[in-house]
Amino acid sequence: MTTTPSGPLTDLRRRQVLRQALSVSVATGAYGISFGALSTASGLTLWQTQVLSLLLFSGGSQFAFVGIMASGPAAAVAAIATSTLLGVRNSLYGLQVSRMLGVRGPRRLLAAHLTIDESTAVGVGQPETAAGRLGFWATGIGVFVLWNAMTLVGALAGDAIGDPRSYGLDAAAAAAFCGLVWPRLKSADAFAIAALAAVVAVLVAPHAPAGVPVLVAALSALLAAFWRRAHHDPQAPHHWADETAQGTPETQETP
């Protein structure tokens, strides 16, 4: 997604971005109940559970950690591999988000801590730079606050709340992401690539650790996009829209 420089946002535009950030934050933060309950059931204390959510703040890595606590050393290799892959994914997010935010100093550290799936998706999904920054910070802070609050609720309630998946909380975040992606599928090609990525993720999910299906699906989407570009060039001579800054063979003077 390419953002464009912009001045201050209108009140209407700010409300639109903030509504989007809030909806994603609520859907994602609610699932923190599941982590809190699972963490305490795996042997961590209330304070250990809260510190883990505050400092690590990465849902997949947190679940991988408590998986080690619950299953013992036998689960360590798979959990560490999963956490590493998730860390790589967030590093790729950082490359894109850093250009959009343009932050320095302590704010850069805070931005790195808040760079997660949700904040990245809402931020880069905006057509204006100012809206992208607002979406990133609002979503990142919203998810952080709600995830930690719901972690506390889950840790305190424990087994009393039963299996959080029975409330559909595990599907809430996925539904929020679908809501973000759907408006961007404005062409048959975009829809086809998104459908391909979804099918790949569903096929890989039963056979791979958490986080890996997302990476594989993203790779398949990139390959499909590159293939389309390589096989749909117009007949020569042709020019892409971004060549106007350098000029075209017809407009350049011959020495």
Image (cartoon, rainbow, N blue to C red):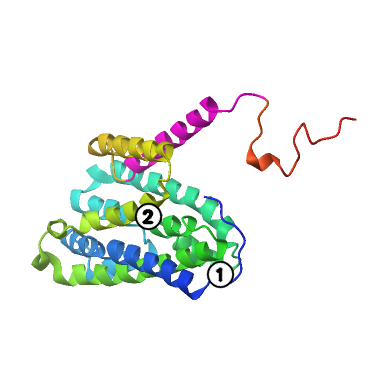
Question: Which label number is shown at residue 180?
Answer: 2
Q: Position of residue 83 (x, y in %)?
A: 36, 48
Q: Nearer the viewer, residue 246 or 87?
A: 246
Point out which mark residue 230 bears.
none
Q: Secondary structure at mark 2?
A: helix
Q: Are marks 1 and 2 in contact (CB under 8 Å)?
A: no
Q: Which residue is mark 1?
A: 106
Amino acid under disc 1: Pro
| Residues rendered magenta in the picture | 211-236
Task: Return the x and y of residue 140 as percentages of the image width and height.
Answer: 42, 65
Q: Nearer the viewer, residue 246 or 99?
A: 246
Q: Vertical placement of 126 versus 245: above or below?
A: below
- For the point 33% across and 45% down, which residue is it? 211
Q: Position of residue 248 (x, y in %)?
A: 74, 35
Q: Residue at x 39, y 44 (%)?
A: 85
Q: Compute the Cα span from label 1 to label 2.
A: 29 Å
Location of residue 250 in the rendering, given as x and y in whole percent from the top left corner: 77, 32
